[in-house]
Amino acid sequence: QVQLVESGGGSVQAGGSVRLACAASARTYRTDVMSWFRQGPGKEREFVAAVSKDGASTFYSDSVEGRSTISRDHALNSIYLEMNNLKPEDTAVYLCAAGSLAWRLQFARSQNEYDYWGQGTQVTVSV
């Protein structure tokens, strides 16, 4: 069983930045693809970004593309999400997920493809 632990959330003013981290307790084939999802108040969970096994490829949702960067550090079994120009609509619990899914956007966006989930870290963006 792999545990995922997120950190780095907090309260930020609109236009600011945040860097989230997710540390996996182990590296297995089920942590080949790692991603970020988020769930805002009263909203369904949605895909944010994903990074491939080798860290060379990424996917982003339309809502964050261009102002966000996902990356991974294999030595630390960790991934990161840096988000800039934050907006109030970015307010959400951000969750880390890991799985052995094939590297395609249609799969990366699907919550059902992931084997492990973290508890989440809250990001609150105020005007």
Image (cartoon, rainbow, N blue to C red):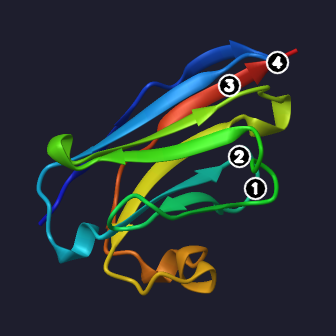
Q: Amino acid at mark 4?
A: Ala
Q: Is residue 7 above or below residue 52?
A: above
| Image position, residue 19 (x, y; %) | 52, 27
Which label's residue is closer to the chain start, 4 or 1?
4
Mark 2, Cα crowd under 10 Å, few <14 / some 14-19 / many 20+, is some
Residue at position x 11%, y 66% in the image:
1
Asked if labels 1 and 4 touch by Cβ distance under 8 angstroms, the answer is no
Judging by the rendered image, the residue that carries numbered circle 1 is: 43
| Image position, residue 61 (x, y; %) | 72, 60
Mark 1 vs mark 3, foreground winner is: 3
Q: Amino acid at mark 2?
A: Gly
| Image position, residue 80 (x, y; %) | 43, 40
SS for tag 3?
strand
Q: Amino acid at mark 1?
A: Lys
- 45 vs 56, nearest the viewer: 56
Judging by the rendered image, the residue that carries numbered circle 4 is: 14
- The answer to whether residue 92 is left or right of residue 89 is left
Asked if labels 2 and 1 touch by Cβ distance under 8 angstroms, the answer is yes
- CA gap, disc 4 and disc 2: 16 Å
